[in-house]
Image: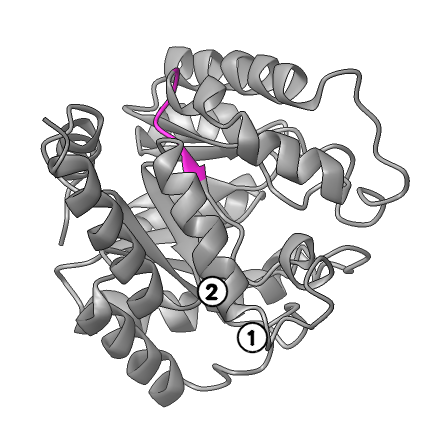
Amino acid sequence: MPQDKDFRAVVNSILEGKRQPLIMGILNVTTDSFYDGGSYADTTEILRAAALMIADGAEILDIGAVSTRPGSVAPDVEEEWLRMQNALTALRSEFSEVFISIDTYRAEVALRAVSEGADIINDVSAGIMDSDMCATIGKMKVPYIAMHMQGTPQNMQHQPTYNNVTAEVSAFLSERVQLFEAAGSPMVIADPGFGFGKTMAHNYQLLHELEQITSCFPTLVGVSRKSMIYKLLQTNAVGALNGTTVANTLALLKGAHILRVHDVKEAREAVEIVAMMKSSVT
């Protein structure tokens, strides 16, 4: 099983320019996620999808058991954990070489998941939605992904406003990174939270100014098939693969260190092309 120190070493190698950015494959074991809800209803499908993602180049698998799409309603803790546990147990048993990330904002689920082999906690609220998260991460001493979200999944898209979205997101992430590092997390990854409490204009300003974040923190970018892409292109999530690849490429050019995606092969190709272009600069 991967160890925390190995994940830190991998991320530090990216920060030092010694290796390519990481690909995180999304495995949502929910019925209502905006794109892949219901796709992985049983263990066989979960393992099949994970094997394909790993073969295509994913080094992290992110398991989500609660949808955080706009207006979503969360199940209780026990239902979330039941969904999560089945997937985590199967994946950890089958794939010892991959890092497993748990997409949860609940400290109790995070605690149980790490005790059963998870490597990373990915929290859409950066600890805001569960006041026990910071102490829990500090106790477990695991890498943590802190995402910016204005509001909650239930209300985040109800007229989000900022004076300067990039400055405000950066300030929030700086405060949360420092808080979780001080609590004992060995590494905190910043996620600017594309699509979470942001208008389309906010999202594209963040993307344009992403270097203000990537130059300060290890940064994960998650734009895969989101409405910031498909609404702009007048399509839907199913038709947003090409737009996603373009947005991922722009994020890589702006210094993203991890891409969180539904489509691993296409993201890996973007990583390789950008890496080759950068290596040719003399």
Seen in the picture, residue 62 relative to 201 is either above or below; the reply is: below
| Kind of residue at badge 1 | Asp
Residue beneath disc 2: 84
Image quarter where the N terminus lies is bottom left
- Magenta residue check for 191: no
- Magenta residue check for 218: yes
Would residue 280 be visible to someone looking at this image?
yes
Read off the magenta span.
216-220
Q: Nearer the viewer, mark 1 or mark 2?
A: 1
Would residue 130 be visible to someone looking at this image?
no
Residue under the image location 64 percent in, 38 percent down = 204
Residue beneath disc 1: 36
Looking at this view, is 54 or 269 the one in front?
Answer: 269
Secondary structure under tag 2 reads helix
Q: Main secondary structure of the magenta part?
A: loop
Residue under the image location 56 percent in, 75 percent down = 36
Q: Are marks 1 and 2 in contact (CB under 8 Å)?
A: no
Looking at this view, is 217 or 155 the one in front?
Answer: 217
Image quarter where the C terminus lies is top left
Distance from disc 1 to disc 2, alpha carbons, whole Å, reads 16 Å
Residue 118's spot in the image, x, y percent? 31, 51
Q: Dot 1, crowdedness within 10 Å: few (<14), some or many (≥20)?
A: some
Left-right relation of 20 to 108: left
| Kind of residue at badge 2 | Met
Secondary structure under tag 1 reads loop
